[in-house]
Amino acid sequence: MEENWKAYLEESLVKDFYDLQNEEERKAAFQDTLKFGTAGIRSTFGLGPGRLNKFTIRKVALGLARYLKAEHAHPTVVIHFDTRFLSQEFAYEIASVLATNEVKAIVSESYKSTPELSFAVRYLKADAGVMITASHNPSHYNGIKVYGRDGGQLLTDPSEILSKYINEIESPLTIEVDEIEVLKDRGYIQTLSSEVTEAYKEGVKALVGPITDYGEKVVLTSLHGTSLPIGAQLLDELGFENYVIEEEQSRPDGRFPTVKSANPEEEEAFSYSQRLAEEVDASLMIATDPDADRFGFVERYADGTTRYFTGNEIGLLLMKLRFQEIQQQATNQFFMIKSIVTGALGEALARALNIEVVNVLTGFKYISEQLKLREAKDQQLILAYEESHGYLVKDLSRDKDAIQFIPLLVKYKQTLSQNGLTFKDVLEDIYQQIGRYQDVTLSPTYEGAAGQQKIIEIMNHFRNDTSDSLLGLKIKTKEDYLSSSIKDYENNCERKLELPQADVLRFTFEEGFIALRPSGTEPKIKVYFSLNADQFDEIVAAFQTQFLS
């Protein structure tokens, strides 16, 4: 098999990566095939069926074409790509395969964000969307996310059907594709109209409204991704010009050369913008990840000190500020959506504000599903969020949307400043109102087959353990989302979980919760702690030593 693939090296699109790889890395590309999972595909580049290259991309595209044609007579797909290596090339490979098989492909002319893709699918009434991105993963990764006609990522059942179509394709090396210009002439490949971008921007502007400048300068950085220039354009069009772009860090560049990790979940990603903020005396820094679905921010104070906000803290702030902004609107019920591993304070704050809480599995596609189910009801979304810096306050898109929060954060900052307040002050008020929890997530990496076995062993240990306490904390309930069961230790009974099956365990205590799940895209296990406990640091350290070493 390897020799067959080598004959196609020159046209694989990944020769430069192949030339830099050692023999072990090259052989690893033939040890497995890429699997289309519930989060799509995310992998490194290489020559072989187990890595991203022109031929594995074509295989996914052909499977998608067959999947869509089985459901729709004349399907249409919108395709966006980010600033990563080969994103644009992969986008046109997918478009070419779809178009050759008489599926219309509408491709963005330049890089665009994930939330814009989700919006475009619904705006154009397309049957599917494809986003070429690996989000905030390292630069040697890329990936494919597939969206349904509702603008959300495919749920489990359609993902499995699509995966079946993909897996039925035995030889990706022989997939036939017509010339792009021929396909354009036939009308099967089209360029995305600027009208779609303008419609998305109008939706964001309607959400935010005019922004009054009260003297709080803002620094923006796209971390070499897709949130600029559109984020700056929105500020301009809403009347706010008191911002500075971190130019070196906002050039589109798939190497992400100015950051160790292009991830606004990590405070280190703000080093360049903090330096610029000191130079220009800015009080707010906003960063987005490469495909602009996640964001983070840092607040700077008059004495020169700064405050980084975690994903859970941002969720609390947005919920409180958004509620204060719209609570006078006539509606039957406000609601918020959060994942089951999002910090415990989010639910506590929502209940204190009389906001209905909807809990879903980890993954924004489940939030999208709830938005779709509730769109016909007379209910007002306050906030949908996950602790991993993904948020939504208006379902212009049905995925995490950092772009709508650039102007919204700026507006909130200016309004708070007018009243002599900061984001830190608002957060402290929340803590005074409902208490203070500590949140941390451990994400140890376990590489290779041995690592995969280690992750399985960790999950099995906790799944099979019948103890009624964990590290000195008395267990109230043990929620096993794989078996769809809740063990209620207080009432000595079992109940059925109503959420879909997933490999997640969640232990609740009087003090909060601890949850575990294997990552869906990386060789990691994630352990979430959200506790109001005096010995928090000791509990986290003991868990790491006893169970993760």
Image: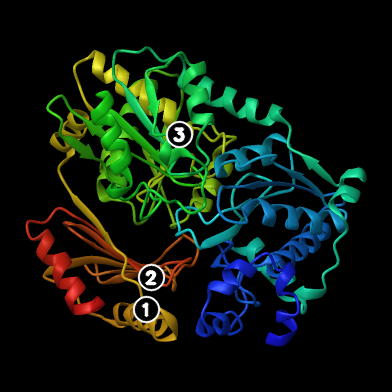
Nearer mark to the viewer, of 3 and 1: 1
**Dot 2 lies on which element?**
loop
- Please name the residue that numbered disc 1 is placed on: 455
- Please name the residue that numbered disc 3 is placed on: 393
How far is the residue under mark 3 from the one under mark 1? 35 Å
Residue at 34% across, 56% down: 341
Residue 166 at what x, y percent from top left? 72, 70
User: Quick check: 207 above or below 464?
Assistant: above
Contact check, label 2 and label 1, Cβ < 8 Å = yes
How far is the residue under mark 3 from the one under mark 2? 30 Å
Residue at 39% across, 86% down: 450
Nearer mark to the viewer, of 2 and 1: 2
Q: In which quadrant will I find the N terminus?
A: bottom right
Label 3 vs 2, first from the N-terminus: 3
Query: Residue furthest toward the left?
Result: 534
* Badge 3: residue crowd in 10 Å (few <14, some 14–19, many ≥20): many
Residue 11 visible? The answer is yes
Label 3 vs 1, first from the N-terminus: 3
Residue at 38% across, 70% down: 524
